[in-house]
Amino acid sequence: AAVPPARAVVRIERKGRGGKEATVVEKLGLPADALARWLEEAKRALGCGGGIEEGALVLQGDQRERVARWLEGRGVRKVTV
């Protein structure tokens, strides 16, 4: 198994999404293939849609608490919300 990222920054974004909230997970520093895998697993785990924008995971809705727990469960040591 690959070493999990040391850190992640989780924030909410409301601008430019047609009024919808999105949860952005940044600073993972993962290669593109790993990022895509994390995105699929996050969408499955959280039951939401999402995508990748500029190396960040973007998940639909306010998932801050849930995504922070999910990241910690995957071994990310420092999760900043």
Image: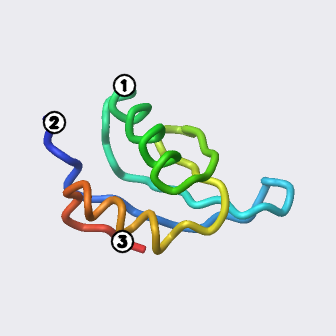
75 or 46: nearer the viewer:
46
User: Which residue is at 31% across, 42% downward?
Assistant: 29
Residue labelled with disc 1: 33
Q: Residues within 10 Å of mark 2 (few under 14, many from 20)?
A: few
Amino acid carrying mark 3 in the image: Thr
Element on which disc 1 rests: helix
Residue 14, quarter of picture:
bottom right
Residue nearest the viewer, comparing 9 with 46: 46
Give the CA distance from mark 3 to mark 1: 23 Å
Give the mark toward the camera: 2 or 3.
Answer: 2
Residue placed most toward the observer, 64 or 7: 64
In the picture, the disc for residue 2 is 2
- Disc 1 marks a residue whose amino acid type is Asp
- Residue 61 at x, y percent in the picture: 66, 62
Location of residue 40 with respect to 80 vertically, above or below: above
**Residue 9's mark?**
none
Q: Position of residue 59 (x, y in %)?
A: 58, 52
Verify CB contact (< 8 Å) between mark 3 and mark 1.
no
Q: Is residue 68 left or right of residue 23?
A: left
Image quadrant holding the C terminus, namely bottom left
Q: How is the image coloured?
A: rainbow
- Type of amino acid under label 2: Ala
The residue wearing badge 3 is: 80
The percent position of residue 30, horizontal first and vertical second, equals 31, 38
Relative to 62, does residue 5 appear above or below in the rendering?
above
Number of labels in the image equals 3
